[in-house]
Amino acid sequence: MRRLTRLAGLAVAGAVTVSGCGFPGLYGVPLPGGPDVGNHPYRVRAEFVNVLDLVPQSAVRVNDVPVGRVERIELDGWIARVTLLVNGDVRLPANAHAELRQTSLLGEKFVALAPPTHAPPEGTLADGALIRLADTNRNPEVEEVLSALSALLNGGGVEQLQVITRELNRALTGRETEVRSLLANLETFIGGLDAQRSHITRALDNLDRLSATLAANRDAIGRSLDTMPAALKVLSDQRRQLTTMLTALARLGVTGTRVINASRDDVLADLARLEPTLRKLAEAGDALPRSLGFLLTFPFPDTALNGIGGDYANAFITLNADVLEILDNLTAQKQAGRPGGGGPRPGPASLPTLPGASGDTTLLPGLPLPGPPLPGTGGTRTGRSTPTDSRNGVPDLLGILLGGGS
């Protein structure tokens, strides 16, 4: 007994000494049989809203395998920060989740680390990493489950189950076939709704846009509704005329139907006869519009409009007053009008002697022209001996034609 008492005293004295030296008490003493954190562990902090009765030295598990322990629990405002010491050989993504679980119904708490389930893994969980509050969770406590069950049994609707069951039996008894058919139809209806889910969603979206449009045009709709009574009054006052018009329109429709039915064969025959004409018009192609354009300026081409500048027209006339060429043209026309006129062109014809002219003058080449003789010609003028003769003989000829001459 004295030995046991002495050992107990030494243990208490050691504990007091350790506490007085600044160590974290018994929580800093490694427990036998605890998880192996290896020679190079790393620390991770996790934020929890409530750690319940989690204490330091609690286990840290991955896939229910102990890989570390809880080193420290601190309070930061309304958030609990838990420092986890994890074995250095454990590799987890940087966005890992931490959850507070329980080994059994009345077992101890532990922290479970796991990769994310609703997002792809990213990076690697390293020393000093922080698992935010959004990535932590906890399981419900037994006390919470029992409390909810107690509220359900005492103040909930459980006591009404007997009444509900009795009323359901009374309502469904003898109507099993109808209820079964109703359930089958309901299943078909729900299946149809599920198949049209995209259309229903689109209709709801369109209804939402329509509602927004109506809300944006609320003032205009209000003005329309304010003027609607006056418009309805006008329609009411003209109801008799509208009724008469609709009745006459109905009679017109009946008559038109009778006429169309009676003339159907003739219309079809006319269309059949019109088909070749339309085909030819189609074959005419671009020639038809060009010809229609020419009809507007007939008998002149459409280029004739270029000579009309407003209320006047430009005209260019070339007048040839050479009498010899005029006579040559007349002679050529007469010769062309004779039978066999297509042969060689005959020589110039003789003309009768003009009044007042000497008997040895002629009007055509080889015939003397009236008038005084030219100097150096020997007293005789020929019609086309030289250009000078032609120019000098024209005034004399015109004088003889207009007023006679000597």
Image (cartoon, rainbow, N blue to C red):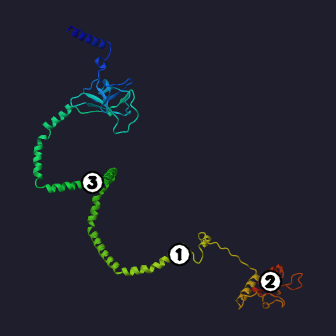
* Residue found 24% across the figure and 55% down from its top: 189
Q: Please, is residue 50 above or below residue 16 in the view? A: below
Position of 148 with respect to 353 (left or right) is left
* Residue found 52% across the figure and 75% down from its top: 283
Q: Please, is residue 259 above or below residue 51 in the view? A: below
Question: Going from the N terminus, do you reach mark 3 or mark 2 first?
Answer: 3
Position of 209 with respect to 296 (left or right) is left
Q: Are marks 3 and 1 in contact (CB under 8 Å)?
A: no
Of the two numbered discs 2 and 1 in the rendering, the one whose residue sits closer to the viewer? 1
Name the residue nearer the viewer: 70 or 4.
4
Label 3 residue SS:
helix
Local crowd size for mark 2, using a 10 Å CA cut-off: few (<14), some (14–19), many (≥20): some
Of the two numbered discs 3 and 2 in the rendering, the one whose residue sits closer to the viewer? 3
Amino acid identity at mark 1 = Ala
The CA distance from mark 3 to mark 2 is: 117 Å
* Residue found 34% across the figure and 31% down from its top: 132
* Residue found 18% across the figure and 33% down from its top: 146
Amino acid identity at mark 2 = Asp
Question: Going from the N terminus, do you reach mark 2 or mark 1 first?
Answer: 1
Label 2 residue SS:
helix
The CA distance from mark 2 to mark 1 is: 61 Å
Q: Where is residue 286, by image quadrant?
A: bottom right
Q: Which residue is mark 2?
A: 396
Question: Going from the N terminus, do you reach mark 3 or mark 1 first?
Answer: 3
Quadrant (top left, top right, bottom left, bottom right) of the N terminus: top left
Query: Residue 61 in the image: x percent, y percent?
Result: 31, 30
The numbered mark at residue 193 is 3
Query: Residue 205 in the image: x percent, y percent?
Result: 33, 51
Query: Residue 277 in the image: x percent, y percent?
Result: 48, 79
The numbered mark at residue 284 is 1
Amino acid identity at mark 3 = Leu
Q: Please, is residue 52 above or below residue 336 in the view? A: above
